[in-house]
Amino acid sequence: MKLTGKRIAILAENLYQELEVWYPLLRFREEGAKVVVVGSGSARTHSSKLGYPVEVDRKAEEVSAAEFDAVIIPGGYAPDIMRRYPAMVRLVREAALAGKVVAAICHGGWMLASAEVLQGRKVTAFFAIKDDLVHAGATFVDAEVVVDGNLITSRKPEDLPAFCRAIIAALSA
């Protein structure tokens, strides 16, 4: 169990992409990590794009980056809602600036842009948000996973195996 003793936050809000929450959540628990679902505070349970629920363990305003080794930002349309909550943006910014692993997949890059942590960084994401990331100062690369220091990004659900392997490798180093 490569992640025993590690604490990972997975962010959640309505309209999340099902696999991008549940695949990492279960995979990291399988490796021994303590995974905490962190919500915006708008609800105790959030529904995915297809209506699948995820229960929130903690609200963003109740946590700090210091509590976690990594923060995971799933995609779907949830990141567009997440970034409306200053506590969620603060958590991402603090984790990134503290050198914690910050990983975003699909539309999760919207949170990285709102947290203002993309200047001079290489990232990937779902192609539809490429312009947003470039305008935030990132260099966009079309690859299944891009690792730039503590920042790990992927494009879509099909990239989840590579995305999770990169996060596990970063947290195991």
Image (tube, rainbow, N blue to C red):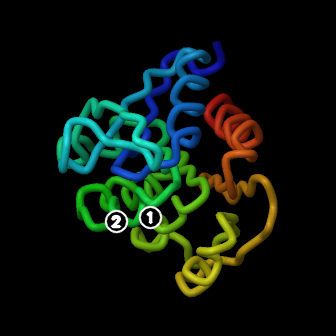
- Secondary structure at badge 1 equals helix
Quickly name the residue at label 1: 111
Location of residue 116 by image quarter: bottom left
Quickly name the residue at label 2: 83
**Can I make out residue 100 in this image?**
no
Instruction: Give the amino acid at mark 1.
Output: Met
Q: Count of labels shown?
A: 2
Residue at 72% x, 54% y is 147
- Is 48 situated left or right of 145 in this image? left
Counting residues from the start of the chain, the first of labels 1 and 2 encountered is 2
* Nearer to the camera, 16 or 122: 16
Placement of 43 over or under 76, stated as above or below: above
Q: Quadrant of the C terminus?
A: top right
Residue at 41% x, 52% y is 15
Residue 130 point in image, percent of width and height: 64, 77
In the picture as drawn, the residue positioned furthest to the right comes out as: 143
